Amino acid sequence: MEKFPPHENENTQVPFGDKLTVSKISEVHIGRDKLFEFEHNPDKIIRVESFSTLEKRYKDRIDPIDVAILGRKLYKELENAYGIFAPVDYVAGKDSKGDKVVYGITDKVDGENLDEIEVTPEIIEKVELLYSSISQYYLDKLPKDEPYLADINNASQYMYGKRKDDEFSRIYLVDTDLYIRDGKVALCNVVLWLYRHMASVERKYGKKFTHAREIIGQILNTPLPQNITEEQRTAAQKIIEKTKGYLEGRIPIDNKDAHPIFSNLK
């Protein structure tokens, strides 16, 4: 995974002038001490990840501060190159207990979750475009030996609405955890889950996302690189064939598929 230069100016205290209070924006996270808000600025949501969690997630292959730097870079790329808006920045520091953490600061969006929103022709068009953009992101990543965001495929991670001072509503990626992967086999698994999530939305919306499906088909038909082991090739081909079976409607979706953020695939 990409490595950045050593850091000399690591924050040693809470890097905010405003007190953090527990956010109630998500019932799922209540009681988990993960989502916070500024006491005097209700327009931001602060997501907290400990250094120890990030070190365990990346098995000490990359420093937590480097993870934050890389995450910022990848979310900016998602916005600038693919039109997927993810209003997030990261700051390393310490929490109120003195533990080292990475703060993810996201603009609060006033709107509705895409998993719960009323389905209208306008929403269908926007979400179909979203999945085309996500699919294109992974198609572009396929031939490159570089990290990519692995957990951006679920409609529940997006809101349709407005930030403070927005004139018009748009789709925002608001679940911006630092789940970053590299490796061709792992990417195949990410694409499998991209299709799983997209198929669920298609069923709910009553429409197949033809362009996104075509792009996923291109990914699945792209030859695997030569510089992978036979074990990796076998694993990748197995995932590709399963995803093709899902895409073509030949086999039912298997609920035992390993999710990309928990998988050990490389």
Image: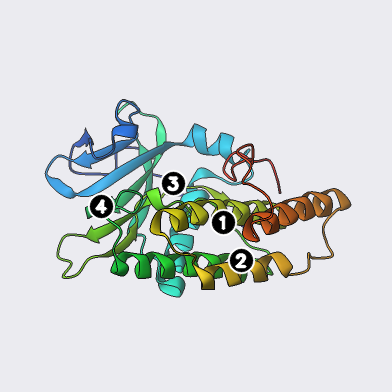
Q: Which residue is mark 2?
A: 216
Binning the other alpha carbons within 10 Å of mark 4 as few (below 14), some (14 to 19) or many (20 upward) gives some
The CA span between labels 4 and 1 is: 23 Å
Q: Which residue is mark 4?
A: 112
Q: Earlier in the sequence, mark 3 or mark 1?
A: 3
Q: Residue furthest left?
A: 40
For the residue labelled by badge 2, is the local secondary structure a helix, a strand or a loop?
A: helix
Identified by mark 2, the residue type is Ile
For the residue labelled by badge 3, is the local secondary structure a helix, a strand or a loop?
A: loop
The CA span between labels 2 and 1 is: 8 Å
Q: Which residue is mark 1?
A: 195
For the residue labelled by badge 1, is the local secondary structure a helix, a strand or a loop?
A: helix
Asked if marks 2 and 1 touch (Cβ < 8 Å), the reply is yes
Residue 115 location in percent, x, y? 36, 50
The CA span between labels 3 and 2 is: 24 Å
Identify which residue is drawn at 53% across, 73% down: 211
Identified by mark 1, the residue type is Tyr
Identify which residue is drawn at 34% across, 42% down: 47
Asked if marks 4 and 1 touch (Cβ < 8 Å), the reply is no
Q: Earlier in the sequence, mark 4 or mark 3?
A: 4
Locate the N terminus and report the quarter of the image it occupies.
Answer: bottom right
Residue 120 appears in the picture as rendered: yes
Q: Which residue is mark 3?
A: 177
Residue 61, picture quadrant:
top right
Residue 130 location in percent, x, y? 42, 66
Q: Earlier in the sequence, mark 2 or mark 4?
A: 4
Q: Earlier in the sequence, mark 3 or mark 2?
A: 3
